[in-house]
Image (cartoon, rainbow, N blue to C red):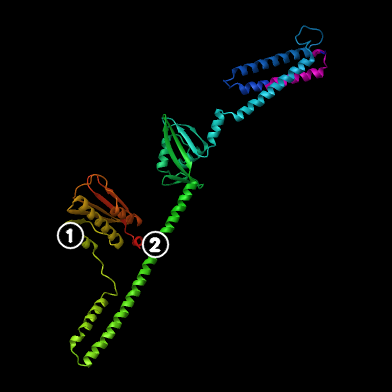
Amino acid sequence: MIYFTQASPVLRVYAILLLFAAIILELFLLILTAHRTGRRYQFTANCMLFAAASILMCGLTAAHGHHGPSEILFTEVPYLYVLTAGIVFTIHASAAIAMEIRRRRTALSPYSIKEAFDNLPDGVCFFTGNGIPVLCNRTMHRLAYAVTGRDIQHISELKTALEALPEQADAVRDGAVYCLSDGSVWHFTEAVTNGWTQVSASDVSELYAKRQEVLQDTERLQEASRNLRRYANNVQDAVREQEILTMKMRIHEEIGSSLTVVERILVQNKPLTQADPVIARWKDNLWMLEKDDGQEAHKDYLTELCELCGSMNLRVITTGTFPEEPGAHYLLITAMRVCATNAVRHAGATELYADIRTGGESATAVITNNGTPPAGPPAEGGGLGNLRRRIEDVGGRMTVRADSGFELTATVPVAQEVYL
């Protein structure tokens, strides 16, 4: 068997270099596993292997440089053993390093958690009880800079910017969402857990786009509905005009035939009493012609309501001015009529009060009575239910209160095209 010192200098150098490479790999392995506190025994074994490889290489280096017999260690170590040890150390270190790298790629670690947190599509930021940010991902950093115009330093800065965007902000507020210049739309929420404040930002760009489409579709449908109402009114006017024209033609024909009858009576010297039926028909026809082409006089709805309530021993007291728009005027009178019926039937009221407030684009009627207050919220049956539907159909709103007495508030728009 050939000893290490008996091998050629080239083979001895190869063996020493192999051990040196194994030492370098073992040292790198120790650096990779130094922070792991859960496997101290494995780190200790790696340290022992590193020490053994270092001692063996130092001894072989001393033996390689010594010439002649000596008592230096490792001078009579078989070369095959040295070569085998170097290969074993190298393979062990390489395999352990590969396993450690694979473990770092697949196992959870603080670095991997931080990387995953930064790569979240939504923005998340955690603040201490004092409002200092302690953990914030990349998305939230970008959104905070777009909203505040600078890096986030305190939660109060972010809250202030969300309530009222500063001039340097790269965003526009639309209700509860914020539209950035890049076209994205975000919604911010806040939650407090165990003294920590979490501010989250969700990307609602798609929902916002769908909402805008729905609003546009709604506007188009409302315009189409208004056009249909105008068309229906035009059709009704055309039908009414056709009926008036037909009626006029019939009246003129009757007048012509009546003139013929009267002429015969006069020519034949018959008694004039025979012309009384004809004269009565003339009066009727003349009265119909005086109706101004069939247009009926505008009805005084409030007077009719007062007369109706008077028959029920209910006095109507109004304050304010009714809107001039006929549709809004009639709808408020309808609300008073429903309240009058309920006041007499359920509360035994003798007076009905209506406070009319007209201004801007709407008119409001606050209707109360002096009757017995209801025991609870009144059920919206046929009268109140139908009234609510009619008011909401034209874009108005209706509220009913019964805490200290019955009170109905009806608000209707005063635009004429709403009632077409």
- Counting labels gives 2
- Left or right of 108, for residue 170: left
* Crowding near the residue tagged with mark 1, few <14, some 14–19, many ≥20 C-alpha atoms within 10 Å: few
Image location of residue 154, percent across then percent down: 43, 34
- Left or right of 179, for residue 5: right
Q: Which residue occupies 34% across, 74% down? A: 241
The residue pinned by badge 2 equals 226
| Mark 1 or mark 2, earlier in chain | 2
Residues rendered magenta in the picture = 3-25
Residue 17 painted magenta: yes
Q: Which quadrant holds residue 292?
A: bottom left
Q: Which quadrant holds residue 76?
A: top right
Q: Which residue occupies 66% across, 25% down? A: 97
Which residue in the rendered view is the most extreme toward the bottom?
268
Compared with 180, 411 (above or below) is: below
Compared with 249, 397 (above or below) is: above
Q: CA distance from mark 1 to mark 2?
A: 39 Å
Image location of residue 51, percent across then percent down: 67, 15
- Left or right of 35, for residue 399: left
The residue pinned by badge 1 equals 311
Q: Amino acid at mark 2?
A: Arg
